[in-house]
Amino acid sequence: MKNLDVFLIFLAVRLLSVYLIQTFYVPDEYWQILEVAHNLVFKYGYITWEWTKGIRSYVPPIIIAGLYKILQVLGLDSAEVLIYCPRILQAILSSYADLCFYKWSGTRKWAVFSIASSWFWFYTGSRTLINTLECALTTIGLSKFPWPGKGIEESSVFIWIAALLFFIRPTSAIIWVPICFYHLCLSKNSVVSEITTKYIPTGIVVLALTVLLDSICHGSLVVTPYEFFKFNLLQNLSGFYGVQPWHWYLSSGLPSILGIQILPFLWATITVLKNRHIHPNELVMLGVIVFTVTVYSFLPHKEFRFLLPLLPLIFYVSSRFLSAWSRKATKFLVWLVAVVIFIGNLGPAWYLGMVHQRGTLDVMSSLREISKGNFTDNHLLFLMPCHSTPLYSHLHVNVSTRFLTCLPNFNNIDNYIDEADSFYENPNRWLISNYPPNGTLPSHIICYDVLQQSITNILNRYKLTHEIFHTSVPISSRIGRYVVIYKRIDL
């Protein structure tokens, strides 16, 4: 393989993140791919409402399910292997995407440094998030795009990637529509010819294959992009999970995910705008970034991870600027900037990757051992905000479980509150209603330490067995510094 040494550097960084990143980020990492794949292969696993409503494509879970099946056939399907192998697979894909970025940017050392030192890509690059997959495929697609002056041969590879991304992550169209429009403007062929000979045939093939796969897995005919837009835009169900102000991506999103690297990006942006005639590709990329952030800003529900696919465009612009700058700067100044950028990324990568919110993952190993003991008599009750931990993809034991759900208001009920909110309004009332005094109590209760004083009536019949550090800075009043496990006294 050409540039094997560079690929091995990226691979080492991504595999290192598999080992070092031991914290919980968002529920989708476990519930939207791993849990679904576990259910497909091992026939038990919780399927969330997104899958019953058909707004998710089975393409990503099928890939992991294939990996799980191979491990099952080989007799290697221990919980630890099932946890780490999908992350290693994603790390390999992310490493290849990094290599594609390196070749595409043409800036060599600064390309390697920019993408490898990014704290947010290190934090997410080996996670089994659909956004991580989207970022990796977007990077590969951008590297195959026939950018003027890059010497990239005209091909339809990027169109296939863009089409696949649209069907597995419909919002990816926000990035790819302006890029494809730019391609039509660049093409030597007519717009009609390009659309009829490349775009439409590619779209039809990908549509047919994804609809076939999704319909088979869902059990009925379903077009997931349509269902996605219906629920998230027409019914605005995404707003149920949080609404941020229009400026959030500018004031919080981009500054947070870029960290110290926002400085060279802003400096590069000013340089490109001042010298537009000699930076046409960078100008287009900035246009795509502005367009994407603008559209995202109109959507009520916002998250840091939604910006992941913009990283290759941002780092392309900043790394090329740093490369040009370093040719004129002194060696001392170049090293000083590199060290500042590295240290600036090291802090958030360490704290968020190894310290903050690790308890909800660490607790799963203890619960796994508990479940293996006598899983038919065990019943695990998670009294935490919904989806605070992984489930069967990390337990890998078909033990009885229950957690607080947070289903959206599908039926437009007035003054609707979900189960989790109902619980936190009056924990003891909820427990008495769901676990009457004369009924069978769960064998174990898992909760944050801040809840203990609110449910003393039921905890009097339990004993504390585990107290696991979670975070030094809880992000809400419902989350504590420790995750605790209580065992029923009579067991």
Image: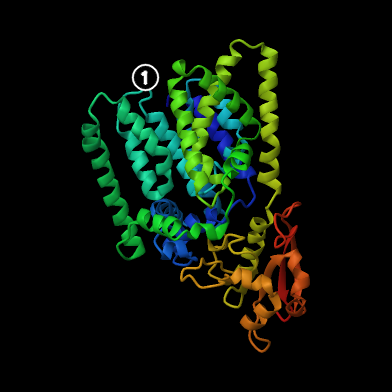
Residue nearest the viewer, comparing 80 with 481 = 481
Taking the image as shown, residue 81 lies to the left or right of residue 173, namely: right
Figure label count: 1
The x, y position of residue 138, in whole percent, is: 43, 37
Write the residue at 54% across / 63% down. Answer: 392
Specify the quadrant of the image occupied by residue 223: bottom left
> Which residue is denoted by mark 1 in the rendering?
151
Quadrant of the image for the N terminus? top left
Q: Position of residue 57 (x, y in %)?
A: 39, 54
* Farthest-out residue, bottom: 438
Element at label 1: loop
In percent of the image, x 76 and y 65: which residue is there?
450
Residue 342, relative to residue 401: is it above or below?
Answer: above
Q: How is the model colour-coded?
A: rainbow
Q: Is residue 19 left or right of residue 177?
A: right
Q: Is residue 363 visible?
A: yes
Q: Quadrant of residue 112?
A: top right
User: What residue appears at the point 36 percent right and 49 percent down from the top-left corner?
Assistant: 167
| Residue 281 placement (x, y as % from top left) | 43, 23
- The percent coordinates of residue 255 (x first, y second) are 63, 37
From the image, which quarter does the C terminus lie in? bottom right
**Image position of 214 (left or right of 266):** left
Q: Amino acid at mark 1?
A: Gly
202 vs 213, nearest the viewer: 202
Depicted 188 relative to depicted 324: above or below: below
Label 1 Cα crowd, 10 Å radius (few <14 / some 14-19 / many 20+): few
User: Can residue 56 be spotted in the picture?
Assistant: no
Q: As displayed, is residue 355 above or below residue 406? A: above
